[in-house]
Image (cartoon, rainbow, N blue to C red):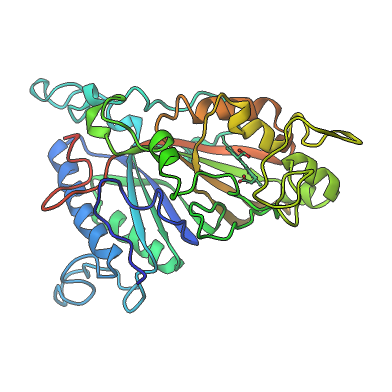
Amino acid sequence: AGTVPFRGAHQAGIVTAAQDRMHFVAFDVITDSREKLVSLLKTWTSMAERMSQGLQATQDGATGSGEYSPPDDTGEALGLDPSQLTITIGFGPGLFAGAPVTPAEGEGRFGIAARKPAALEQMPRFMLDALDPARSEGDLCIQACANDPQVAVHAVRNLARVGFGVVAVRWSQLGFGRTSSTSTGQETPRNLFGFKDGTRNIKAEDTDAVDRFIWVDGADDQPWMAGGSYLVARRIRMRIEPWDRTTLHEQERVFGRDKGSGAPLGQDDEFDPLDLQSKGPNGLLIDEDAHVRLASAEQNGGIRILRRGYNFTDGSDGLGHLDAGLFFIAYCRDPQKQFVPLQDALSRNDLLNEYISHVGSAVFAVPPGVSSGDDYWGSGLF
Ligand code: HEM
């Protein structure tokens, strides 16, 4: 109990029932040595597998490496339950770029330019984007999710610690309160605007949708990505104070759903289908520019994504406002064909835009899961 299997065809932390807490970190790779990078990926894989089982990051752990060297594990998770910890890695576009190390090793900083998937492109600039470069992009990412925040933070801290000299933390984000359910067994949680979030998300049990919209197929693009996925992260600031001064009617019009029950406007139950056609006394039941209409598969040629985001509150902004919002994470089989057209449509017309602002953005190729023996994260790429 409390443990999510680390190995498998796919990495854990994607269709795994969303845990309550998250620590997400993006790194820059600061070495040009392919050998050092591969060696770190191997070390990380072994540490991540151990920590997912509730073990210390290495065998020596917090106290076993002697009095005269820094402990091998930072120690703050000693005695804590594994708390469903999952650790998921992604590779950013920058990992594939740069000058070749030596001509013999091929193109790109690590000789892997030819293996860059076409689907792995930095996001285009969307309307109203207000991106902070210091909170965007990255060569590698780690998503650690757990039901105990200390367990998630411990995982990221220990991976970052052993990465010294190879990677440097570019930005990181803590999240609390999952904003999506990813399994039919989960109650739908609420985001910071107080609405149920994740009702019409892809659920792990819907294996047809999972295969069609989340997992990369070997024939899609780069064969090493088969069984992997792509992660799009967007730090979305939510304008809490103006929202809190908005009437209930307007709040419900913005989303197209009832605040209490989560039902689509005009329906009774949370899981009733959206009625996108019918009119009520004041026009369409679900506004032409309501968030759920513009984001729906019906409106977007059948496109769906897996949402797996978290609420965040990073204190206040010095101007009397909460620095709060949604750390949006989407998994999809091809971000160019799924996230990009969806966000393009939302960025133009979504009623929600008055109350939100996208301030960070990143995309990563998430390789398949680790198989048996000495397999490691990204072995297919190097
Ligand atoms: C649906 C909130 C941003 C994609 C929903 C729902 C809520 C919500 C309350 C209705 C419940 C549900 O079906 O999950 C928010 C908030 C956002 C945000 C507060 C920003 C702070 C985004 C972004 C995307 C997105 C950036 C993708 C580019 C979707 C999709 C649905 C959805 C695909 C399901 C629509 C349907 O088929 O009914 N969102 N969302 N959302 N949202 Fe968002």
Quarter that holds the N terminus? bottom left
Ligand 1 image-quadrant field:
top right
Task: Please tell me whether residue 277 is drawn above or below residue 141 in the rendered image.
Answer: above
Residue 348 x %, y %: 67, 25
| 341 lies left or right of 217 | right
Which residue is depicted at the point 44% across and 57% down? Answer: 17
**Location of residue 265 by image quarter:** top right
Q: Position of residue 170 (x, y in %)?
A: 40, 44
Of the pair 186 and 290, the residue shown nearer to us: 186
Residue 46 is drawn in which quadrant? Answer: bottom left
Q: In the rendering, at what x and y percent does residue 132 appear?
A: 54, 37
Q: Nearer the viewer, residue 174 or 344?
A: 344
- Visible in this render: residue 85? yes
Q: Residue at x 64, y 28 (%)?
A: 347
On the image, which quarter does residue 162 sit in?
A: bottom left
Q: Which sits in the foreground, 161 or 380? A: 380
